[in-house]
Amino acid sequence: MSQKKKMNVLFWLRKSRAQNGANAPLYCRITINGQRYDFPLNVSIRSTSWNASIQKSIGKTEQDREANRAIDNARIAIEEVTAKITEKNYELNTANFRLIHTAPTCQYNTIKLLFEYHNNIEGDTLRESTYKGYRVTLRHLLNFIRIKYHVADYNITSIDKTFTMEFYAYLKGYRKEGKIKCRTNAALKHIQRFHKVMNLAERNEWINRNPVILEGIHQTKVNKGFLSEEELQVITHTMLPSHLAVTRDIFLFAVYTGMCYCDIQELTNDNITRGIDGNQWLQYYRKKTNQRVSLPLLQPAARILMQYATHKDTHQHLPIFQVPCNQVINRSLKQIATIAKVNKKITFHMARHTFATTITLCNRIPIETVSKMLGHAKLSTTQIYAEVIDTKIMDDMAALKELFSNKYSDNIDKKASNQ
């Protein structure tokens, strides 16, 4: 007979310890060769909800669902304990079962503690913006369990697929107490971070398997806005107050180099070199992907650089541009768009999109080259811009197709009238 067949598992309601004559605590009983070991599941339900024959609560309240989840988790824990007994080549008896079952668990056994552990060990490799993202995800999780379970923290061994789906529903706006709901892509990003943190728990064997899996939900494609050549020219030649003119220069430098906000903040004379053609080149490592970027400076970018780059020998390591915070620069860009009468919501990151589309792909620069100049780690990231260009071609060709369609119809009408 196998070890597993020597053991019986029973879940039962300990009515003798009923609270206020209503709720009674749930217990699990392990019986091995006639020897018993009882342990509590730390949940209580009404006696009328308990079905002893199926060992489940048949009630419909959240309390009943929590009890059934505790039973399911206990079954998983029992399997893990028996597996460890077999692995350690111990005899299957109640003493050894109790020994392993009551062994100290990891100190990072709650959502909050696990996130803190993750952020501590990954702290040196995470960018500040990424680190901030994990803090936001944790804040959403803690608010969710406060609303759903009325607790300040939650044990990671109690997390299951249902928890994940309900957390996703919360992010999308269900029971969020009037707060702004997340869009699909933002909600998925929080789930992805949660999944990564739970992967850490699985690798450390603090949980049996990672239950954070969101099936059937996919990212929605976002149309990456960019400026046309005509809009660029309007913005370039519009008269602006001095403080907005500085913002425009920084924005246009990003348009003609593809640099993102965090990289242009740290641009110094060290990043400006002489290339193999003898002209000025821009060389740096992109902060987000750590990819090396090297590209010749286009004339508009070189002209802007001449205005701001100080003497190379005395200010070699100082930032070339005094870049305001992201919120301020985006607010200034909104003002510039209004003055220039450009009917688009311009953000600083739109400069990078414009470089990828209007400046490079629209001028037949190969997508592989564009990918390198953008510092993308994967070509598939750049291919999103190629899809944007296809959409632009379709829109631009619509008027031409209509013109030819009208001409064709006119010719048919003339032939018909001559016959």
Image: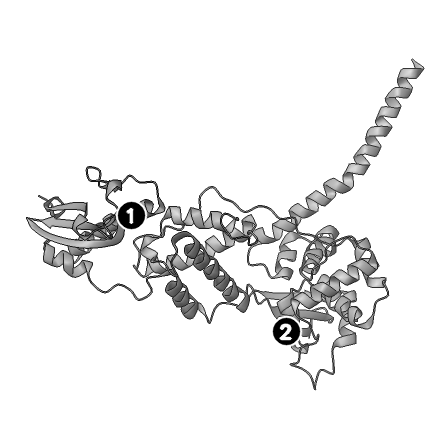
On-image quarter of the C terminus: top right
Tell me if 351 is positioned left or right of 161 in this view: right
Along the line of sight, which residue is nearer the eye, 339 or 180? 180
Q: How many marks?
A: 2
On-image quarter of the N terminus: top left
Q: Which mark is residue 333?
A: none
> Looking at the image, can residue 141 be seen?
yes
| Above/below status of 41 relative to 239 | above
Callout 1: SS = helix
Q: Residue at x 75, y 60 (%)?
A: 334
Q: Which residue is mark 2?
A: 266
Along the line of sight, which residue is nearer the eye, 355 or 69? 69
Crowd tier of the residue under label 1, counting other residues whose Cα lies within 10 Å: few below 14, some 14–19, many 20 or above: many
**C-alpha separation, residue under disc 2 versus residue under disc 1:** 55 Å
* Furthest residue toward top: 419
| Quarter occupied by residue 119 | bottom left
Residue 341 placement (x, y as % from top left): 82, 56
Crowd tier of the residue under label 2, counting other residues whose Cα lies within 10 Å: few below 14, some 14–19, many 20 or above: some
* Furthest residue toward right: 418
Along the line of sight, which residue is nearer the eye, 374 or 169? 169
Q: The residue under label 2 is which amino acid type?
A: Glu
Q: Which residue is mark 1?
A: 67
Tell me if 418 is positioned left or right of 402 in this view: right
Residue 311 placement (x, y as % from top left): 74, 83
| Quarter occupied by residue 37 | bottom left
| Quarter occupied by residue 234 | bottom right
> Looking at the image, can residue 89 be seen?
no
Callout 2: SS = loop
